Amino acid sequence: MINRTIYKEIIKSIKNKPVTVITGARQVGKTTLCSLIEKDLGFGYVTLADPLMRNAAKEDPAEFLSLHPAPYIIDEIQKAPELFDYLEGVVDANIKKGNKRSLYVLTGSQAYRLMKGVSESMSGRVGLISMEPLSLSEINEVEENPFEINLEKISNRCKNYMIESNKLYEYISRGFYPELYDNLELDSAAFYADYVATYIERDVSDFINLKDKQKFINLMTILASLTGQELIYDNLAKEIGVDKKTIQSWISVLIAGNIIHILEPYNENSMTKTITKRPKVYFSDTGLACYLARVNSAETLKYSYLKGHMVETYIINEIIKSYKNNHKDVNASFYYYRDFEKDEIDLIILSDGTLSLIECKAGEEYNKSDIKVFDKLKNTQYKLNKGVIICTTHAIYPIGKNCLVLPISSI
């Protein structure tokens, strides 16, 4: 089993909060970490994926909770939302007795529904942990810290850790779900075929009344080919053959299930009239995106028109994972920049009053002309960090006074 960076943050939350909520897409490893919590901290465990347990929880929530007293893990709790109101009373009763920490761990793959129940019943008493698929640092057993533009730290990291471009394309096309690395003989296409079918049948059908499953799959397929690009609802509606409101609803479902995520455009008051207002869409796992886009191997990816967008998706996902896995995403915001002149910066990180500007590339050699757009933010109201291009280079080198070209392994 691959050690997960986020596990220490989960344990920290459990020891400091009465309730810890773990969200994340199906198959990212929530249940595996629950088994570790069970073993390491002595929690009980029940999953509401079991129809008998789910029915018991829905029919008599009070009795269900009395049979599963704290400390307990309730997996897939969003399948029985009736539990939330009763859980609030149980948590209150424990707190009054002096039991203020380590009461319940709740997990679920539908973040919106899960947090809706939590916010309505237990606001302020919950530690929230968002799990992502594996990071490449976890797979390669390399220390994982939130990405920052610090030349000394990056140089030290890259001395003994380098990812060859051919190997990178293998990782991107295979994806990062733990089961694919627990069993390296597992065919990724077969895994993703089962994944999509199960996601549609269980998660989506739990969330909305989906009348046309094929059109929903068509939307996923089109979005996979658009990963790293602007999200234009009207275009999607025309292509799928449904109205705009339906597309917006389905996009919300995909976001809630952690299948996709969006980057909002960066904005300051001085820029309001010159920048695009549309968000960009990214698949949360490149392997799923490659499967849906029919990019079925590393070799195919190398020559595909989607190569640049898949590499960009990979880089942005890895950077966000590095923050989430260390629970530092609460202190950082992620954006992209695009103006009406079509000048774009792939990723902007705002953290501690500092802007970091990042371009994501699939090549190796770049020069000052490739980072001219960085000047668009030279008058930002925030402190401006060095800009970087992260790409498939094997060496760190400067271009211009305040910009570095970095290898993929710097993340």
Image (spheres, grey):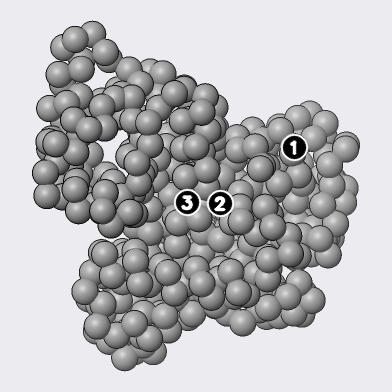
Residue type of the residue flagged with mark 3: Tyr
Which residue is painted at 61% across and 66% down in the image?
287
- Asked if 67 appears above or below 344 in the picture, the reply is above
Residue type of the residue flagged with mark 2: Pro
Image quadrant containing the N terminus = top right
Q: To which residue does mark 3 refer?
A: 335
Residue type of the residue flagged with mark 1: Val
Mark 2 residue crowding within 10 angstroms, few (<14) / some (14–19) / many (20+)? many
Q: As drawn, is 143 to the left or to the right of 251?
A: right
Q: How many marks?
A: 3
Which residue is painted at 12% across and 27% down in the image?
89
- Asked if 13 appears above or below 225 in the picture, the reply is above
Q: To which residue does mark 1 refer?
A: 142
Q: Are marks 2 and 1 in contact (CB under 8 Å)?
A: no
Picture quadrant where residue 314 is located: bottom right
- Asked if 369 appears above or below 29 in the picture, the reply is below
The residue closer to the viewer here, 196 or 324, is 196
The residue closer to the viewer here, 1 or 162, is 1
In percent of width and height, residue 401 lies at 76, 41
Q: To which residue does mark 2 refer?
A: 133
- Asked if 63 appears above or below 39 in the picture, the reply is below
Helix, strand or loop at mark 2 = loop
